[in-house]
Image: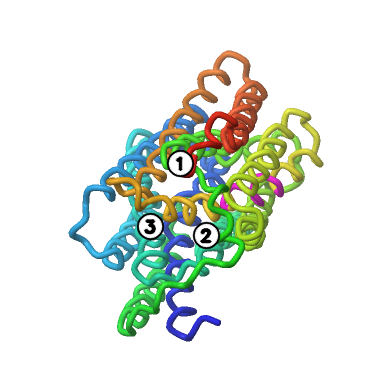
Amino acid sequence: MPGTHEREATIAAALVLVIGMGFGRFAFTGLYPLMISDHAISVQGGSYAAAANYAGYLAGALLSAVVTGIPSRRLCALAVISTVALLGALALPLPEWAIVSVRGLAGISSAFAMVAASHWLIHDRKHHQGAPALFAGVGIGIVLSAELIALAHLNALTSRAIWLTLAVAAGALAAAAVILQRRADRASAPAPQPLSVRGQADGAQLLAPLRLIVIYGLAGFGYIITATYLPLLVGQVLTATDPVHIWAVFGLGAVPSCFFWHAMHERFGTRRSLASNLVVQAIGVALPVLHTPAAYLLSALLVGGTFMGTATIAMPAARKVAAVVRFNMLALMTAAFGIGQIVGPLMANAIYARTQAFDISLSIAAASLVAGAVLCADLPRNKARSHPV
């Protein structure tokens, strides 16, 4: 059982992801339709803002791979403070190009949050079993920000006023995260937690570093169209319902999923659990092409219930094989994910410009997830090798 300091450390790291990812990264998805209604941004501008955010995420991941002199806890503080500032900046009457720029900077902060929080809890604190609670912070952040958006919209606040509300809420959470991390680090780091018996016996289930990076990149491409455009798609069908509530369902599905996929990883190993995760996610990504309310709701549940599960499986799996590489495995995994996320919205925008629909983009995204699942297979020609592939 984890002690008090480990529980505080887990809560602190999860709060970093609540702020940096749930608010800083994904609140834009919930506010995107309202920003269009307020004429703060166009559909095309929103696609560019999304792509800029993901480009910033990639840049932040690469930067965190080379910035080795800054302790992870300080990088977490930098991530949450900068996220709060950038949320507040979107409350200003900015032109579209400036919104795109701010979203790019927010992507850098999000990557710092993901890499630093993961490194601090899993590597520095050696609290491997805290991974599911850590990544559940993303889903919690999506739910909190989405419901704040819905409540503010119900009270007729403009999109800029809602950005300010989000900045204030994130600021309060940031203060709690910084305090809890400082308290946890005052205690000595615990001894490394041993792998479970199943985990020790499951070495054949590990994936080679480069293959794991490719799979994670495909996962980034596969989920991002749903994660960017779902409220916009829902708003075209469910006109009587605020689409941000469907986005909250997406985040709500992510919270327990981290614990479920962690248990799957512990029981069945990396290959089987990750392949299963990607196949379920592919089904969820493809469902909106049916254009029915039930399909959108089930898509939110399935994609929300798998996309952070992918990280819950892949990030600890990356740490297990990190000893055989000479680069920052967590940072490059995050970078590969970021590349997939940049390509997704740009492709979707180009296809939308021609077809005025996202069906083709969603089908391609689902296929990429299936391809990632196939890559999880233990290919016969590699079974004779002594190292994990």
Q: CA distance from mark 3 to mark 1?
A: 25 Å
Marks 1 and 2, how far apart in space?
23 Å
Q: Which residues are magenta?
A: 301-308
Q: For label 3, count other residues whose C-alpha is less than 10 Å away and answer few (under 14), some (14-19) or many (20+).
A: many
Any magenta on residue 87? no
Amino acid under disc 1: Ala
Nearer the observer: mark 2 or 3; the answer is 2
Q: Is residue 48 toward the left or the right of residue 371 in the image? A: left
Q: Position of residue 229 (x, y in %)?
A: 59, 36
Magenta-colored segment: predominant secondary structure: helix
Residue at 34 percent of width and 41 percent of height: 56
Q: Nearer the viewer, residue 126 or 38?
A: 126
Residue 189 position (above or below residue 257) = below
Does any portion of residue 162 appear in the rendered image?
Answer: no
Question: Disc 2 on helix, strand or loop?
Answer: helix
Circle 3 sits on which residue?
113
Q: Is residue 29 above or below residue 51?
A: below
Residue designated by label 1:
208
Which residue is under mark 2? Answer: 135
Q: Quadrant of residue 78?
A: bottom left
Front one among 64 and 38? 64
Residue 37 lies left or right of residue 171; in this view the side is right
The stretch drawn in magenta includes residue 305: yes
Dot 2 alpha-carbon crowd within 10 angstroms: few under 14, some 14 to 19, many 20 or more: many
